[in-house]
Every structure is written in C-alpha cells, then in structure tokens.
Image: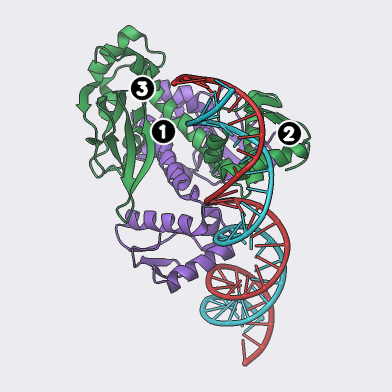
Chain colours: A green, B purple, C cyan, D red
Amino acid sequence: MQVHFEALARCPLFEGVPGEDVAEALARMGAKPARFGPGELIFLEGSPADRVGILLAGAARVQREDFLGNREILSALAPGDLFGEAFACAGVKRLPVSVEAVEPCRVLLIRLDGIIEGGGNDRVFLNLLRVLAAKNLRLNEKLAITSRRTTRQKLMAYLYSQAKAAGSEAFTIPFDRQGLADYLGVDRSALSAEIGKLRREGVIESEKNRFRLLNVEGM
Amino acid sequence: MQVHFEALARCPLFEGVPGEDVAEALARMGAKPARFGPGELIFLEGSPADRVGILLAGAARVQREDFLGNREILSALAPGDLFGEAFACAGVKRLPVSVEAVEPCRVLLIRLDGIIEGGGNDRVFLNLLRVLAAKNLRLNEKLAITSRRTTRQKLMAYLYSQAKAAGSEAFTIPFDRQGLADYLGVDRSALSAEIGKLRREGVIESEKNRFRLLNVEGM
DNA sequence: TCATGTATGTTGGATTTCCAACACGGAGGC
DNA sequence: GCCTCCGTGTTGGAAATCCAACATACATGA
C-alpha cells in the first residue's frame, strides 16, 4: 500500500483528500491490500457484493457469463480504477459479474460498510456519491445518442452535445474514427461516409478530430 | 406536506424510514414544499444544480434544448419520483435540463447539503446512494442490450438477461410489443417478425408476454 | 528510398431495417 | 349479434446499414 500513490491519486474516491491523509483513511475503512496473478478472480460472480475494489497496479477486466455460459467482457480496468461500487451501493445480494486479473495485479479491497461507517472521512463518502452520479450522467448521455435510429442522427446528436459541452460550434472530439464508431454503435466506414456527406452538404466542416457546425439545418 | 404520504412512501429516498420519522427528517433537511401550474418550470436549465426534487402530486417532465433550440423530452415524472439527484450529486455547476410541470404539481425541494449534513438520518443518505447505484445498473444493462447491432441480437440479449434474472428459462416480460420495441430501440413490426422467426426456428416459445428459451443455439 | 503500418475515405453488393398498410382476433360496449 | 378499438402478426418496397475490399495519405524506421 505504500507505493501506489499515483494510482490512489488517480482514483476519484480520494479526490480532494490530502495525500498524507489517504493512508489513514484507508486504515480506518479497513482497506485490505491483495495481489492476484493473471487469470485469478478478484471478484467471483455470485459472491456477496459487499466490497468495492481499487486497482493499484496491473490490468484486469470485468466480465460475466450470459445464459448460455459464454463469457462477455464488459470493461477493462486500469490502475486507479474503482470497481464493484455500483453493485455494492445498489445492495444487490450476489455479484452478477466477475473481475479477472489479466496481468499481475495489486488491488485494495474495501468493505462498503467501512466507507459508510468507519471511514470518518466525509470526503470519501461524497466522492463515492459523485462517482456514481457522474457515471449516471455519462450513461444517460450515451443512451440519448445511441438510441437514435440512423447513423446520421447519432452522429449529429453526438456533435451537438459536444458543441453544447464546448460552448462553441467548433470543437475537438476525443475519438478517432473507429473509436467514434464504437461509441455510436455504427460501422466505421458508414460513419466516414456520413461525415463526408455532411461535409459536402455544408452542414459541418471537419478535419481529423476537429469539427465545426455550420448550417443548423440538416437534422 | 401533510397529505402526500403515499407519494413519499413510494419515493425510494425514504425506503425503510418509519412513516412517523419522515416529517421530522424532511424538516431537518430543510425540505421546502412548492406548487407549480402547468407550463411552469420547477427547474430551469442553466440554474445551479444544488437541489433535488420529489414530485408529490401531478405530472411533470424532464426536458432540454439541443444545440438548435429544439426541445427534447427526456423522461416523464409521476408522484413519488425523485429528480435532479444525479446532477446535484455529480456536482455539475448548472443544470443541463429543465423540469416543467404538465399538470398542477406539488413538489418538495431539498438542498443536497441538507441531505448530506443536516439530515441526521443516515438511512436517507444511504438510500440516495442506492438510488444512484441502481439507476446505474439499469442503464448499464440497457446499454449492453441496445448496443447489439441486429434486432435478433438485441432481442436475444434481452431474453437471456430476463431468463437469468428470473433464474428460469421461462418468464414473463413487463412490456407489450410496442414497449419492448421502444426499449430495444427497434421497429415494432420487425420485432414481431423476429419473434415469429425465432419461434418457427424452435429457439423460443412465446405467447403474449410469456417466453421460454428452448434451444441454446441460435445466437 | 523503400517498406511497413496505421488512420481515413470510398465504393458496391448483400443484408437488414424501417415504414406503411393491411389482416386477424379478442375485449368490451351498444 | 354487431361494432369499434387495440394489440399483434404479416407483407412488400424503399431506405439504410453492414461488410469486405481497396485507395489514399501520412508517419516511422530500416
């Protein structure tokens, strides 16, 4: 626990907590360090969802089995990432997912009780609230965009939301084409074609990741 | 505030709080009752997001304006519903949505500070955490389903998740065809056609809202 | 310079979805 | 019985997507 300052600093759970107080807060919350080798399960599907985890070092992934027994990978975890918090906070009895180490991992496991009662550090508690709420907003935003029917509608909804967020009709996006296609849930080549069409129609200007909305027609 | 017991009882924020303690908790949190007529704005887009609301009576809707100024309706609110909590908890400065009364409304407005500090009622605080986490899980689940590409994949993903939730290969779903189509983000007639095809292929049995998964082939 | 790899744009055909329209059957009211 | 309404299933053509393949541009390193 002594080394992974950078991972803990990156963890949103300790945002605003002075570095010198983190260790004490961890101790009061009963945080337990643990190590896992590749392939080992940090969380096992079906076990009680009473703890949250923080990945300090290594790489892991969240996965589950569908009704047929096929493994489905839900997300990848990097150092500093928090995991399991939604299940613990929602009060589900048994975890519907597993977390598997893909590289040698160091993690911190903290009982939710520890954060709620023992922590004493209100800031950590508020950060937990904030993490959940922020993820909520991100998911809502993504759903509002991907629930549109056509590639063009999805793309325009995304560009408008980015323009609104930037407060300007010119902005840069944090995706390359493949990443944007994945985010929107569409085919990359169809996305490229649609961007080209919008450009020819004079609806947008674009170059690489830079976009500018021109005519407000075209939705 | 004296009348709307049923709405407050339905509000997940007070789950597990004895009915006789609710009024006192509300007072300590500084909850303020308010009334709004049809068309009046309970929350105004751009104003500070420091309060949460509880709809006690009437009907309202959450909406926002896109980059073009078009109004987009995000959700409908019924008595007992909590609103604005994700924005307040995420610490966004200004609300990105408005909440407009569509019928004469009675609401309770509570500053987030009041819930966090003044409440004194830990249960309310934990409920807030639970509400956010539960919505998180619902959104994640929906996204995992609707991000599939084809109607069949979306439908099967939904049916498998329902089967897993029910713990049985036979189950009933809480949607009619149109509702399921909306949830999956597909065309109703295409959905009906796909259900018929799956039935003829022997993958599922179905009658109205009752489904049964047969062969585990077919995904 | 050349080879290689990566990101992006473009194209054509197969597949799928959407959309509108209609058929069918049951529930309920007259 | 008869009618209407509503939910569901079915169908055919228009439109959009997906997929695979290839072209282009640019950067990197041998």
Disc 3 residue crowd, few under 14, some 14–19, many 20+, Cα 10 Å:
many
Query: Are discs 1 and 2 less than 8 Å apart at CB?
Result: no
Q: Amino acid at mark 2?
A: Ile
Q: Which of A8 and B84 lies nearest the eye of the viewer?
A: A8
Q: Which residue is mark 1?
A: B128
- Looking at the image, residue A120 sits to the left or right of residue A182; the answer is left
- The tag on residue A80 is 3
Residue B59 in percent (x, y) is at 60, 46
Q: Chain of mark 2?
A: A
Report helix, strand or loop for mark 3.
loop
CA distance separating discs 2 and 3:
37 Å
Going from N to C along the chain, the mark reached first, 2 or 3, is 3
Residue A133 in percent (x, y) is at 46, 31
Disc 2 residue crowd, few under 14, some 14–19, many 20+, Cα 10 Å:
many
- Vertical placement of B65 versus A148: above or below? above
Specify whether disc 1 shares its chain with disc 2.
Answer: no
- Looking at the image, residue A24 sits to the left or right of residue D19; the answer is left
Residue at 46% from the left image edge and 23% from the top image edge: B114
Residue at 32% from the left image edge and 51% from the top image edge: A70
Residue B102 in percent (x, y) is at 65, 45
Q: Name the mark nearer the viewer: 1 or 2.
A: 2
Report helix, strand or loop for mark 2.
strand
Q: Chain of mark 3?
A: A
Specify whether disc 2 shares its chain with disc 3.
Answer: yes
- The tag on residue A204 is 2
